[in-house]
Image (cartoon, grey):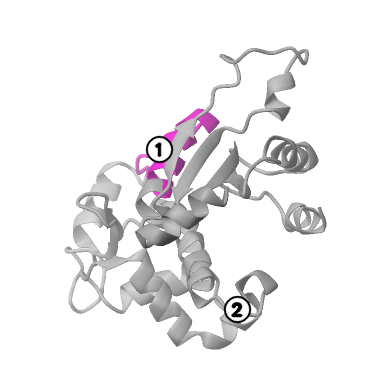
Amino acid sequence: MKLSQAQKALEFLKSNPNQKFTARFIADKLIATYPQDYIEKRNNIKFENNEGAFKQQVIRELYSIFPDLIQNNPCVKYQERPRPRQYWYEPPSNLSPITGIDFHNSLIIDAEDNNPPPIQEKIFSEYDLYPILIEYLSKELNLYSLRIDEKKSSNNRGQNGNQWLHPDIVAIQPIDKKWHELVKTCVKHGSGQNVRLWSFEVKKELNNSNIRSSFFQAVSNSSWANEGYLVATSISTNEVEEELRML
């Protein structure tokens, strides 16, 4: 049976308890361990002859699944600082070496009449996602990002007009850092570009009710960018994902 990305990551961490790994290291190990599972993704036309872009996509997918993996598996831990972020599996310390039963937690549950306290799940708003994405773009892609608040910009397009004009986040990527000075001069006098412009439209979730408007909103407000992205924490159903692929 083919394992999901989350299951693969969990199995890898379990097999290496108390060892800390970056998402990049985990991605390399998963690709090496399950090569057949990544054939279709590797053959995607946008990754053709670009192994770096292919691996970066796997790393992005790992970043997207780790919040739920940590929420659903108390033994999966992560360290935010110092960078880079690291993940590891910490086995329960109170397990019986013979039966594997956690006596300490069993006593607590019995004392509370089998009613353990519910896990409080943090609810993110779309605005909570902006600084998270900006930090990711800075640390992982070396982009200089800026949040655009459409509510504060001038609007002559009517109600909600700026939603179709301004993306949520814009970013600039200097591409001339390693260029020779002669190349920089040549590009400057030839009116060439020494930067790439990125655009990001952020949604909390893509679902049946917002998929089309979100997609065309991203297309509309990113027409000036070299790279335009529609970013979401989740896609609600397989049908929504298929419609996104069609669009």
The quadrant of the rendering that contains the N terminus is bottom right
Which numbered disc flags the more N-terminal residue, 1 or 2? 2
Residue 121 visible in the displayed image: no
Q: Residue at x 21, y 68 (%)?
A: 95
**Image-quadrant location for residue 163:** top right
Residue 237 visible in the displayed image: yes
Where residue 241 sits in the image (x, y, percent)? 73, 56
* Marker disc for residue 195: none
Is residue 134 found inside the magenta-colored segment of the image?
yes
Give, as a single range, the part of the protein colored magenta. 115-137
Task: Give the left or right position of residue 33, taking residue 204 as reference.
Answer: left
- With respect to residue 152, does 125 lie above or below? below
**Between tags 1 and 2, which lies in front?**
2
Mark-to-mark CA distance, 1 and 2: 38 Å
Where residue 39 sits in the image (x, y, percent)? 61, 83
Where residue 104 sits in the image (x, y, percent)? 19, 56
**Image-quadrant location for residue 91:** bottom left
Q: Secondary structure at mark 2?
A: helix
Choose between 237 and 137: the one closer to the eye: 137
Where residue 190 sits in the image (x, y, percent)? 56, 52
Dot 2 alpha-carbon crowd within 10 angstroms: few under 14, some 14 to 19, many 20 or more: many
Residue type at mark 1: give it. Answer: Gln
Residue type at mark 2: give it. Answer: Arg
Task: Give the left or right position of residue 200, taking residue 24 as reference.
Answer: right
* Marker disc for residue 120: 1
- How many marks are shown on the rendered structure? 2
- With respect to residue 78, does 164 lie above or below? above
**Image-quadrant location for residue 90:** bottom left
Q: Residue at x 53, y 27 (%)?
A: 148
- With respect to residue 30, does 95 lie above or below? above
* Marker disc for residue 42: 2
